[in-house]
């Protein structure tokens, strides 16, 4: 059985491939990437796969049985890109697509939810057997702010007391590998998130504990947080997006307590303390 992984040179894609190497022979894996050069270090078969070049997608999927469709990284372009991939997969005779979607896609207020929702609809209408992994927030999305919080003496955001059930990228990669190599997953939709939630106040407290410094959490309005991000050099449009994600977090859109992720992998998800320690180490 040949498994192909899109976005193979991305952070999640690399982790999935490394996890799959523990479970199946490398001959059964194909890394799909825009840059063949970047993917050479993965030590598996590599095929060029550019979402913006639909004509090249079907040939790249020749001989593939299962496709892990890791959601594209370009917000705003995902609908057309995913559509091209699903159409190519159907034409190439792919037998199963596993797609990384977004936690609680059906009712999330996150702006990126719309593209995931449409992609899920396309999958269901494609006739190809599918599994949907609705990934929650990567803890790294927040711990990437740890060095800046230490330098600035505070962690800023506009998530209020929102509960964030974050898990490390490696946890989500473990789940994807478990599904790809497991049984009885077709037709299922999994809501994946960390075992334990944290608030941004909890994150600030953990940074303080590990550094021995007083790093408080400063909760701002969405407008003021957007301005703060711009002052730190974040482009205005992306600053608005990030602040919008925090506002969604304040509504508990990033919270889930179903523990489906740890049940799939058989392991507890990475604790916040470990993710913070990794961020401090750099």
Image (spheres, rainbow, N blue to C red):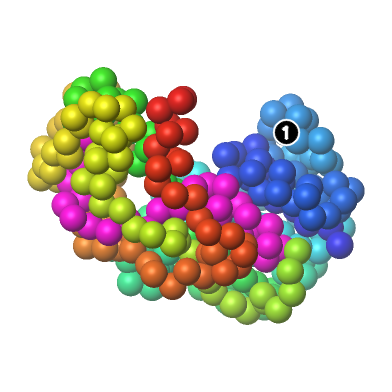
Residue plotted at (38% across, 34% down): 144
In-image side of 212 versus 4 (left or right) = left
Secondary structure of residue under mark 1: helix
Q: Image quadrant for the N terminus?
A: bottom right
- Residue 78 at x, y = what percent? 49, 52
Asked whether 95 or 14 is in front, the reply is: 14
Q: Residue furthest top?
A: 151
- Dividing the picture into quadrants, the one containing residue 161 is bottom left
- Residue 255 at x, y = what percent? 33, 63
- Can residue 89 be seen here? The reply is no
Asked whether 226 or 175 is in front, the reply is: 175
| Magenta highlight on residue 87 | no
Mark 1 surroundings: few (<14), some (14-19) or many (≥20) residues within 10 A: many
- Dividing the picture into quadrants, the one containing residue 85 is bottom right
In-image side of 224 versus 84 (left or right) = left
Asked whether 211 or 136 is in front, the reply is: 211
Residue plotted at (20% across, 31% down): 215
The boundaries of the magenta stretch are 155-180
- Residue 74 at x, y = what percent? 47, 43
Q: Is residue 45 above or below residue 107?
A: above
In-image side of 123 versus 224 (left or right) = right
- Residue 18 at x, y = what percent? 72, 44
- Can residue 241 be seen here? The reply is yes
| Magenta highlight on residue 175 | yes
Q: Is residue 247 above or below residue 141?
A: below
Asked whether 37 or 134 is in front, the reply is: 134
Report which residue position mark 1 lands on. 39
């Amino acid at each position: 059985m040949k498994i192909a992984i899109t976005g193979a040179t991305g952070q999640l894609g690399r982790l999935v491939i490394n996890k799959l190497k523990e479970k199946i022979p490398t001959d059964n894996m194909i890394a799909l990437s825009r840059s063949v050069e970047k993917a050479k270090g993965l030590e598996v078969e590599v095929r060029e796969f550019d979402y913006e070049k639909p004509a090249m997608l079907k040939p790249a999927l020749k001989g593939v049985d299962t496709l892990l469709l890791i959601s594209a990284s370009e917000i705003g372009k995902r609908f057309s890109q995913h559509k091209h991939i699903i159409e190519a997969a159907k034409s190439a005779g792919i037998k199963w697509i596993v797609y990384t979607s977004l936690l609680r896609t059906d009712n999330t207020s996150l702006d990126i939810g719309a593209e995931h929702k449409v992609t899920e609809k396309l999958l269901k209408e494609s006739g190809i057997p599918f599994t949907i992994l609705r990934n929650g927030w990567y803890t790294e999305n927040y711990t990437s702010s740890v060095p800046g919080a230490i330098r600035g003496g505070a962690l800023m955001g506009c998530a209020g007391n929102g509960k964030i059930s974050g898990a490390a990228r490696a946890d989500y990669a473990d789940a994807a590998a478990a599904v790809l190599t497991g049984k009885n997953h077709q037709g299922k939709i999994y809501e994946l998130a960390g075992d334990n939630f944290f608030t941004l106040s909890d994150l600030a407290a953990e940074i303080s504990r590990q550094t021995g410094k007083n790093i408080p959490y400063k909760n701002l309005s969405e407008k003021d947080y957007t301005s703060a991000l711009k002052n730190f050099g974040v482009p205005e449009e992306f600053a608005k997006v990030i602040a919008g994600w925090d506002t969604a977090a304040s509504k508990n859109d990033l919270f889930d307590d179903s523990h489906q992720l740890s049940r799939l992998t058989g392991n507890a998800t990475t604790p916040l303390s470990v993710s913070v320690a990794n961020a401090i180490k750099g």
